[in-house]
Each structure stands twice: as C-alpha cells, then as structure tokens.
Image (tube, helix red, strand yellow):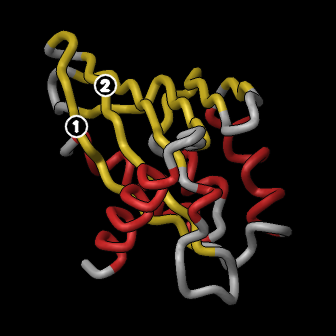
Amino acid sequence: MAISTLYFQMIDGWNRGSGSIFAAPFAEDGDLVDFDGTHLKGLQNIASVHQQPFDTFLKGSRLVGKIRNIRFLTPDVAIMHAVGGTIMDGQTDIEPERNSIHTIVVKKVDPNNGHWLITAFQNTRVQYFGRPQETQRLTEELRHELER
C-alpha cells in the first residue's frame, strides 16, 4: 500500500461523513491533535469524536487535500506534510479560513506485507498573520486539487 493512500482514506471518510472510515488508517493507539488543540488517543476515540460533527455542523461538507511531501525517517517510519481545505454543505468553494496544514507520522506495522498505519496526525489551522497573499496562494493550490 502506498503511504499516501492513508491520507486519502481519511479524506474519503470525511467526505462520506463516516468517523469509522476517517479513522480506519490509524493505528489502534494512534494520536490525533485537532485544529483546536483537542488531543484524541486511539482509533475508536478518533472515530467516535469525529462522527458527532459529521452528523451535525460538518454534515455534507467536503475535504480536499494535497500531500506536499513524504520523507522517510527510517525504512519503517515516514512523515508526510499535507494541506487541506473544507467546502461546507451547500457551498461550491473552499473557505480559506478553514485551510489547514497536516503533519502525519506513519509506521510500517507489518514488514512482510508492507502494511502502514498512521501513528500521529497534527491538524493546524493556517493563519498566515499579516500575509494574506499566502492564504490566497494556499486556497488556489487547493482549488487546483478540486479540478483534478
């Protein structure tokens, strides 16, 4: 399995409004730090905590993401940096104030079959204080992903 697949499985879960699909790429003891600083521990916790917003204020929203880089720290551990944007239900465009940068640590859990899982995910809301052109640049980058 390609490491990048894990990130896009999360996005698929978001877009389906499914906490369990969203969390499926995580290790059982995985960590997720959300944009507001909430620290979730464990696959089941990540799934259940995400299901609530998927059923309410994020219902019908779509997430678009792009992996910017993948770097292997060891043959069995890699770090990905990605960016994401949200299109809320009933909208047709990304809301720049919801843009995020993601740091994802993945680990090979079975060296025999090359199976990887997410062990840590950090979601940081992009602010770019005093640099509105950077917000615009990121939003355009994500819009380009929508066209794919």
| Dot 1 and dot 2 residues touching (CB under 8 Å) | no
Location of residue 15 in the rendering, given as x and y in whole percent from the top left corner: 55, 70
Badge 2 density bin: few <14, some 14–19, many ≥20, Cα 10 Å = many
**Circle 1 is placed at which residue position?**
69
**Mark 1 or mark 2: whose residue is earlier in sequence:** 1
- Amino acid type indicated by mark 2: Ile
Q: State the mark number for residue 99.
A: none
Which quadrant would residue 72 be assigned to in this image? top left
Query: What is the quadrant of the C terminus in the image?
Result: bottom left
Q: Check disc 1: other Cα within 10 Å, few if <14, some if 14-19, many if 20+.
A: few
Q: Quadrant of the N terminus?
A: top left
As drawn, 81 above or below 6: above
Residue 13 sits in quarter: bottom right
At horizontal 69% and vertical 82% (from top left) the residue drawn is: 89
Dot 1: what SS?
A: strand
* 145 is higher (above) or lower (below) than 10: below
As measured in the structure, the alpha-carbon distance from the residue carrying label 1 to the one carrying label 2 is 8 Å
As drawn, the residue found furthest toward the top would be: 74
Closer to the camera in the image, 29 or 98: 98
Q: Quadrant of residue 19?
A: bottom right
Q: Position of residue 29 (x, y in %)?
A: 58, 21
Residue under the image location 64 percent in, 29 percent down? 33
Residue tagged 2: 79
Residue type (three-letter) at the residue carrying disc 1 = Asn
Rendered location of residue 119, percent (x, y): 47, 24
